[in-house]
Amino acid sequence: MKEIETIKERNKRVERDKAWETSKTRRIIIALMTYIVIVIFLWSINVSRPLLNAIVPTIGFIISTLTLPFFKQFWIDNVRN
């Protein structure tokens, strides 16, 4: 009985981790962190308008997270093991 409870707890933990990995909240947090780091970097190397220029790589990250589910499904459907 203890083993079953241990497995159930593990499954709950795995489900929560998976939900976090695919959550919009996680994507937004990473996008904001990416933007801030890039702004600091661009500012430190004296790039003009770092607040504006940091938007491009941040948008690239967001686009990549939006397209990954499509490519994942394509890979699952078409790659034979």
Image: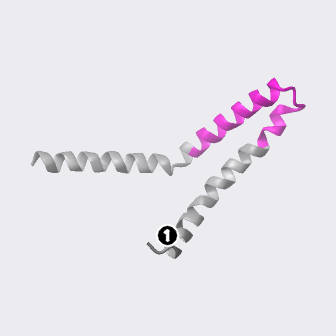
Q: Position of residue 59 (x, y in %)?
A: 73, 48
Which residue does the image show at 78% across and 42% down from the upper left?
55
- Kind of residue at badge 1: Ile
Vertical placement of 78 versus 18: above or below?
below
Which residue does the image show at 56% across and 61% down from the upper left?
69
> Which residue is nearer to you in this view: 62 or 44?
44
Q: Which residue is mark 1?
A: 76
The residue range painted magenta reads 27-55
The main secondary structure of the magenta stretch is helix
In the image, taking residue 43 as reference, residue 10 lies left or right, namely: left
Direction top: furthest residue: 44
Direction left: furthest residue: 1
Quadrant for the C terminus, please: bottom left
In the image, taking residue 60 as reference, residue 2 lies left or right, namely: left
| Magenta-colored stretch includes residue 13 | no
Q: Position of residue 63 (x, y in %)?
A: 68, 54
Q: Position of residue 73 (x, y in %)?
A: 53, 68
In the image, taking residue 64 as reference, residue 73 lies left or right, namely: left
Q: Position of residue 35 (x, y in %)?
A: 71, 36
Which residue does the image show at 14% across and 48% down from the upper left?
3
Which residue does the image show at 90% across and 31% down from the upper left?
48
> Which residue is nearer to you in this view: 55 or 46?
46
- SS of the residue under disc 1: helix
Direction right: furthest residue: 48
Label 1 environment density (alpha carbons within 10 Å; few <14, some 14–19, many ≥20): few
In the image, taking residue 12 as reference, residue 75 lies left or right, namely: right
Vertical placement of 63 versus 48: above or below?
below
Number of labels in the image equals 1
Residue 53 sits in quarter: top right
Vertical placement of 75 versus 27: above or below?
below
